Image (cartoon, rainbow, N blue to C red):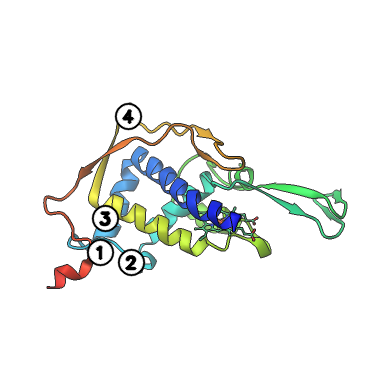
């Protein structure tokens, strides 16, 4: 139960903040995302959960966010039996902490690992090395829900608003670990939404059908 509250609460919110910070710092990505969303959802209704499978670039932006900013970056494993990994002997009962942050920014695995490059060819080929949700039998059970929450939140924010940050020209991407094992922005993302349309979009898409 404790894992559910911790996992379900802050992780999607923090991932959404990281994604918006990257999007605000990369106006070309914002433009391309918006073109995709406008093409699929139009301008008369809000983007919604059922649109997500038709938004591959939004999906790529979320994956790239999770690669560079995995909020649960380290997770422990206790070995049930002895084995050898990469030439190292591991005794039964050893606890090994797996660092997904280090692997997902490893220059031996990724080209330009510290650059936010959604949908680049090499990124797609390396999807197997993407594990922001952990792995194996105790992999995060909320990953599908997380994609829906984060995807819908970013989709609507990109669709409806332009974004201006309060201080400076770029969001400060410095990292902190507020909670143990939890990767968050060191400085809160403070930005101002500027409405994109003169006519506010209805919250219920069916209203437009009346
Ligand atoms: C972007 C959002 C999220 C991220 C990055 C994330 C990441 C993770 C990671 C890395 C783990 C450890 C997995 C492992 O040890 O292999 C985990 C565990 C867990 N997550 Fe998530 N999570 C997210 C959202 C959610 C949501 C929305 C829920 C619930 C609806 C959830 C529920 C859980 C639970 C219950 C566990 C513990 C699983 C276990 O110990 O068996 N997570 N999550």
Structural crowding at the residue carrying mark 4, measured as other residues with C-alpha within 10 Å and reported as few (<14), some (14–19) or many (≥20): few
Alpha carbon distance from label 3 to label 1: 10 Å
The residue lying at 35 percent from left, 52 percent from top is: 154
Quadrant containing the N terminus is bottom right
Task: Using the image, determine if residue 113 lies above or below residue 81.
Answer: above
Task: Using the image, determine if residue 7 lies above or below residue 44.
Answer: above
Structural crowding at the residue carrying mark 3, measured as other residues with C-alpha within 10 Å and reported as few (<14), some (14–19) or many (≥20): some
x%, y% of residue 205? 22, 67
Sequence-first disc among 2 and 1 = 1
Q: Is residue 34 visible?
A: yes
Q: Which residue is mark 4?
A: 169
Q: Quadrant of ligand 1?
A: bottom right
Q: Which residue is mark 3?
A: 35
Sequence-first disc among 1 and 4 = 1
Alpha carbon distance from label 3 to label 4: 23 Å
Q: Is residue 117 visible?
A: no
User: Which numbered marker is on residue 41?
Assistant: 1
Quadrant containing the C terminus is bottom left
């Amino acid at each position: 139960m404790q894992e559910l509250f911790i996992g379900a609460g802050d992780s999607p919110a923090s991932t959404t903040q990281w994604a918006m910070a990257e999007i605000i710092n990369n106006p070309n990505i914002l433009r391309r995302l918006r073109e995709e969303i406008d093409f699929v959802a139009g301008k008369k209704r809000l983007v919604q959960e059922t649109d997500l499978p038709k938004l591959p670039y939004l999906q790529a932006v979320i994956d790239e966010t999770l690669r560079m900013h995995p909020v649960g970056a380290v997770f422990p494993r206790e070995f049930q039996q002895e084995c050898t990994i990469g030439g190292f002997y591991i005794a039964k009962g050893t606890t090994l902490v797996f660092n997904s942050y280090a692997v997902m920014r490893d220059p031996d695995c990724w080209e330009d690992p510290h650059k936010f490059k959604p949908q680049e060819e090499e990124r797609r080929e390396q999807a197997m090395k993407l594990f922001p949700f952990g792995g194996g039998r105790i992999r995060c059970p909320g990953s599908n829900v997380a994609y829906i929450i984060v995807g819908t939140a970013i989709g609507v924010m990109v669709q409806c608003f332009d974004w201006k940050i309060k201080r400076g020209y770029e969001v400060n991407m410095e990292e902190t670990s507020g909670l143990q094992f939890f990767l968050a922005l060191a400085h809160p993302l403070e930005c101002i939404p500027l409405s994109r349309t003169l006519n506010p979009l209805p919250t219920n898409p069916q209203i437009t059908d009346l």
